[in-house]
Amino acid sequence: MEQIRVTLANGIELDCVDVGPRDAPALIFLHGFPESHRTWRHQIAHFSDRFRCIAPDQRGYRGSSKPEGVDNYTPDKLVADIFLLAAALGVENFTIVGHDWGGAIAWGVARAGEDTGKVTRAIVANAPHYAVFQKLLYTSPVQRGASQYMRGFSDPANDAVVREHGLYGILAQEIRWDAPDKMEPEERAKLLEDWQDRDAAFAMLNWYRASPVDIPTMDAPFEVPGDWSPPPFPPLTIPTLVIWAQDDLALPPENTDGLGEHVKDLTLVEVPDCGHFVPWEAPDAVNAAMEEFLARTA
C-alpha cells in the first residue's frame, strides 16, 4: 500500500495510507504494538471501494516522527494526533477503528470526538476499555499475570537488550503470545526488519512508559486499592462495535464483562479460535462484523 507523508499542525509527521473515494465516509484505522498500518491490510482492501480508508503509522512507528522523551507519548498527545490527521486530510467526521494500543487510542478518540460530531462510530478490536482493564489488573490473577510484560517494557533496565538486539530482543524476553506461524512470511520478514530500528523501538516502548495504567506485581493483593475509582467519564453514546478474539493470551475475554456500563450502544462480536491479532488472524470474521455494523449504523 502506497503511503503519503502528512504533516500535522503540531509538527508531527505521519506516514499514512489514504485510499478510497474522497467523498465516501471515512474510516481511520489505528494499529497496535508492535505492528504498523499493515495490521489493517485485509480490511483496507475489503472496504476501500466504498469508504475512504486512512491508516497512519502512528507517532514513533516506522518512518513517522519519533520525538524524544517519554512525555511525548502520553495518551492525550496520541489522541490529538488523530484529530490533527483528520484535519490535515480535510476529513470532517469519521469512524474510528483500532486494535490493541490503537484500540486504546480509539477509545480516547471516540470519547473526545462524540460530542463534537467528529467521531460518529467506533470499532475496537481486542483493546480493553481503560476502566475495565485497570480494575482487572487489580482483581484478576489471569489479567495481571498476562500483563507483567508491560512492566518489563517500561523498565529502563531492559534498554541494553533493546540497544543490542532491537525490539525483538525485548519481545522475546517478555512475551509468549506471538503468533509468527499465523502471519504471511513476507509480512513477518518486514516486521522483523522494522524491529531493528532502535529509534523506533524506544519510541514504541515509550507508549507503555507514558501510560497511566498501573500494573501491580504478582505478589500485591488482588483487590481494588481504596484510593482508586473508575475515571469519571460518562458512558460512550455513539454506536460502538467491539470485536474480541477469544483465545487472546494478553487480553482474555473477561475484558468484555461489564463493558455495557461504559458503552450505551454496544455491539459485541466474539471471534472463537483466534489469538490477539484478530484483524489479520481472522480477517473474514472481522470484515463481516464491520460490514454488518457499518451498514446498520449508516
Image: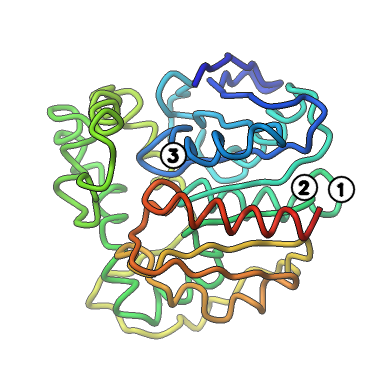
- Point out which mark residue 119 bears: 2
Cα gap from disc 2 to disc 1, whole angstroms: 8 Å
Cα gap from disc 3 to disc 2, whole angstroms: 21 Å
Q: Earlier in the sequence, mark 3 or mark 2?
A: 3
Q: Residue at x 64, y 33 (%)?
A: 48
Question: Which image quadrant for residue 13?
Answer: top right
Instruction: Decide if residue 175 is on the left or right side of residue 54.
Output: left
Residue 96 rendering spot, x and y as whole percentages: 66, 46
Q: Residue furthest right?
A: 116
Look at the numbered disc 1 and give the secondary structure of its residue.
Answer: loop
147 w.r.t. 291: above or below: below
Q: Residue at x 46, y 80 (%)?
A: 225
Q: Which residue is mark 3?
A: 39
Mark 3 surroundings within 10 Å by alpha-carbon count, few (fewer than 14), some (14 through 19), many (20 or more): many
Question: Which image quadrant for residue 19?
Answer: top right
Cα gap from disc 1 to disc 3, whole angstroms: 28 Å
Q: Nearer the viewer, mark 2 or mark 1?
A: 2
Name the one closer to the observer, 150 or 83: 83
- Point out which mark residue 258 bears: none
Q: Which residue is mark 1?
A: 116
Q: Earlier in the sequence, mark 1 or mark 3?
A: 3
Name the one closer to the observer, 62 or 218: 62
